[in-house]
Image: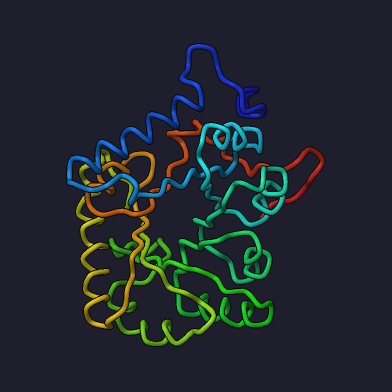
């Protein structure tokens, strides 16, 4: 990791972290305006995985409040070192053996990707007195290597998911396949929105949240109805590829 990433500092000649955050916020506002939406309908989740608490603190000081992590062990070490004003979302694949550790730290889980994980969360939440808010991850492209409910399975299992009393299902989430151009992700965002609308109508429920769009395509996602966009690199810069941990802490997930 370079010195800038370690300290949350700035490489000479590069935009500041505050400048990058402002640019992302401007792009969200512009995308919302293009389709007649209020930018206030969109929550920016600044994904801070692999970046140190100092970088999170700089983004927090610039006015960003919601942050995303995808590794439970990293988040447990990092979150106590950041101001309590920060709010945290879990945006990765949640392993069954990490559920109990994760529940106290996150206000929203974006990636509940199977009925089995949901049932485990329900059981542990009952034992621990937690009330998790969750989104259901949908494998919109049918990729064999991706986590998430196939659309037909989410329809078949939604009654069972809704019967879990501790979990509040607030909406859907997707991670489209990487695309060379942002516009090529649009069809996946449309598919997620249309699936949400079908589930709301067919099951007579409210699923207000759509978590879709990352650094390369979040503006397109906003145009297609995203209420949560998960942006890391465009704010924090390139990731190191290694899990952040305090000096002297060994091990990884």
**Residue at position x 31%, y 35% from top?**
27
Image location of residue 58, percent across then percent down: 59, 31
- Tell how many labels: 0
Counting from the top left corner in percent of width and height, residue 99 is at 62, 69
Q: Position of residue 164 (x, y in %)?
A: 49, 84
Q: Nearer the viewer, residue 178 or 3?
A: 3
Give 245 or 162, whichever is nearer the viewer.
162
* Residue sitting at x 50%, y 22%: 16
Q: Note whether 125 is above or below 32 in the view shown.
A: below
The quadrant the N terminus occupies is: top right
* Quarter where residue 139 is shown: bottom left
156 left or right of 246 in image:
left
Q: Residue furthest left?
A: 35
The answer to whether 214 is drawn above or below residue 210 in the figure is: above
Figure check: 53 above or below 211: above
Query: In the visual, does 238 lie left or right of 191?
Result: right
Quadrant of image for the C terminus: bottom right
Residue 103 appears left or right of 163: right
The x and y percentages for residue 84 are 66, 48
Furthest-right residue in this view: 248
Which residue is at 47% across, 40% downward? 232
Residue positioned 28% across, 49% down in the render: 221
In which quadrant of the rendered view does residue 176 lie?
Answer: bottom left
Q: How is the image coloured?
A: rainbow
Near-viewer residue (8 or 21): 21
């Amino acid at each position: 990791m370079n010195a800038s990433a370690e300290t949350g500092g700035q490489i000479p000649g590069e935009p500041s972290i505050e400048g990058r955050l402002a640019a992302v916020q401007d792009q969200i506002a512009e995308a919302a305006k293009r389709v007649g939406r209020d930018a206030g309908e969109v929550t920016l989740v600044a994904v801070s995985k692999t970046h140190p608490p100092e970088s999170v603190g700089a983004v927090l000081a610039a006015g960003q409040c919601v942050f995303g992590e995808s590794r439970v062990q990293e988040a447990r070490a990092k979150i106590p070192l950041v101001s309590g004003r920060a709010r945290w979302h879990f945006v990765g694949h949640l392993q069954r053996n990490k559920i109990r550790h994760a529940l106290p730290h996150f206000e929203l889980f974006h990636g509940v990707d199977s009925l089995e994980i949901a049932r485990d969360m329900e059981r542990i939440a009952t034992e621990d007195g937690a009330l998790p808010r969750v989104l259901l991850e949908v494998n919109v492209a049918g990729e064999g290597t991706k986590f998430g409910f196939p659309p037909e399975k989410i329809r078949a299992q939604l009654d069972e998911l809704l019967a879990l009393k501790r979990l509040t299902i607030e909406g859907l989430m997707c991670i489209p396949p990487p695309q060379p151009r942002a516009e090529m992700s649009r069809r996946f965002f449309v598919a997620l929105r249309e699936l949400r609308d079908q589930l709301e109508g067919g099951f007579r429920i409210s699923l207000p949240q759509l978590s879709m769009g990352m650094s390369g395509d979040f503006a397109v996602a906003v145009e297609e109805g995203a209420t949560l966009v998960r942006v890391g690199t465009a704010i924090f810069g390139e990731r190191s590829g290694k899990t952040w941990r305090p000096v002297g802490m060994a091990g990884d997930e």
